[in-house]
Image (cartoon, rainbow, N blue to C red):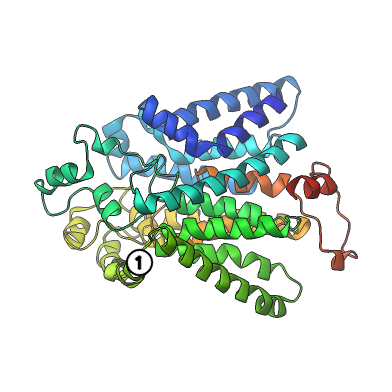
Amino acid sequence: METIRGRVILLLLCVYPFYAYIIVWHLHMIPEYVSGLVIYGLFIELLITKFRNNETLRIPGYVSILAIFTLYLFLSKIFISDIVADIGIAKYLYRDDFLRTIVALLIIENTRFDKKAINLALHLLFGILLIASVVSIIQIEQPLFFRNGEWLNGYGSIEKYEEYVSQLGPDYDDAVTHVKEGYRFSIYSWTNGISVGLDALAIFSILWGIKSLSKIKKILLLISAGFISILSSSRWIILNFFIVFSQRIFRSRKPVVYSLLLIPVLVASIFAIIWGAQYFGFDYNQFFKERLLSKSAGTRFYAFEVFGRVYPHNPIFGTGGADTSEMLRLIQGKTSQIHVGWLKLLYYYGLIGGLIYLAFIVSILRHLYNEALRSRYWGSFFAILAFVIANFTLVELSIFYHGLLLAMLFSRQLRNQPDSSHSSDLALDFSDAIPLNRLANQLK
């Protein structure tokens, strides 16, 4: 049963964008809720198996801290705000991303994944990232191609929908705004708007961390991730692309020398990607003026001003995840929320919740860092690091994203061979590692 459990969750995470498309477009359901049912079912099987075999459930420290934070959120939304009372305890727990994340992480930490499944997953992820880059290119000329368009149902075209929602007020639907401003979500719009940054770049990081990739695959991987990042038209995604790319410099024994060799490759790749995108109709001048240099970056600075005014009202325990009337008044007509995740965390859950969540972030990064030191594989660490840095420009505290969960999975399962020049490195016991010769041969 352990083998089946491992293959089910691995397959679910690898094909999640297409799974989400089926769930949304054909079943008209929410992917996170349906995947939650699958994960809870696998967790029950895990507990039964552990009980039958008289084994102990492994609970890493970072999962324990996340569980404490999840409990704190639940209690704060009962006693500080009315969120739980408004939707009901059962429905709240069913919808809770953090609870699903805890269960998924426990499954990952207590499952031994067979080597064949891991190898096939790597091939699958590589292919999916290539497909995602092609879809991003197609969306230059056809912005609604493979895009979640349920909001268009009954209107027939984006123009008719825009005419309808414009009558509702000056702040019409974000979905229309995103299309008009050139945001491209590739294959990831069926989950949510930031999945293209968190999931695609996490998968890029996972694969980019494999040293045994052939040169052709490295180039294809770099160009594919570059297309997805640049065509997304989101500054934070482009920044995270550079952060993930830098792991090859970071893990080198001579980072300064290696950076002098690698940075020109990155610059050349970026110019090649931009030139290629222009060939397919990408307006580089519009992208540079209206996106990279747009005034929307000011909303991040304004977030500090709003935070400074509203945080002192509930500094210790926060608002229980609810927006106060004062905060809504301050942001009206200027932005949609406090656009800095770390500030929103303190505003919603106070100093207590902020410290607990910070402890979780430090713990998970330390966990991945120690794993990377032992295995010399940095792909997973940089995937989560990019998530942490992203929260300086967006708001997302949950890591219930298939790319991020895959990063946690591969941190234990994927072991990278050391460089030939480092043959004197200490030999470690990787009993569940992929055979390096087989991995190298299959990925070439």
- Report whether residue 274 is seen: yes
Q: Amino acid at mark 1?
A: Phe
Q: Position of residue 37 (x, y in %)?
A: 49, 26
Left or right, residue 186 beside residue 174: right
Please tell me which residue lies in front, 438 or 63.
438
In the depicted structure, whether residue 423 falls above or below residue 206: below
Furthest residue in direction front, as rendered: 279
Which residue is located at x 51 percent, y 71 percent? 271
Residue, disc 1 = 287
Furthest residue in direction left, as rendered: 167
Quarter the N terminus occupies: top right
Mark 1: few/some/many CA within 10 Å (<14, 14-19, 20+): some
Left or right, residue 426 beside residue 35: right
Which residue is located at x 65 percent, y 43 percent? 409
Please tell me which residue lies in front, 63 or 422.
422
In the depicted structure, whether residue 374 falls above or below residue 109: below
Q: Position of residue 330 (x, y in %)?
A: 19, 62
For label 1, the SS is helix
Left or right, residue 250 beside residue 145: right
Left or right, residue 270 beside residue 305: right
Furthest residue in direction right, as rendered: 424
Which residue is located at x 64 percent, y 65 percent? 247
Residue 43, located in which quarter of the rendered image?
top right
- Report whether residue 363 is seen: no
Please tell me which residue lies in front, 3 or 267.
267
Q: How many numbered dots are placed on residues in this image?
A: 1
Q: Position of residue 234 (x, y in %)?
A: 39, 61
Residue 413, located in which quarter of the rendered image?
top right
Q: Position of residue 179 (x, y in %)?
A: 29, 52
Which residue is located at x 67 percent, y 31 percent? 6
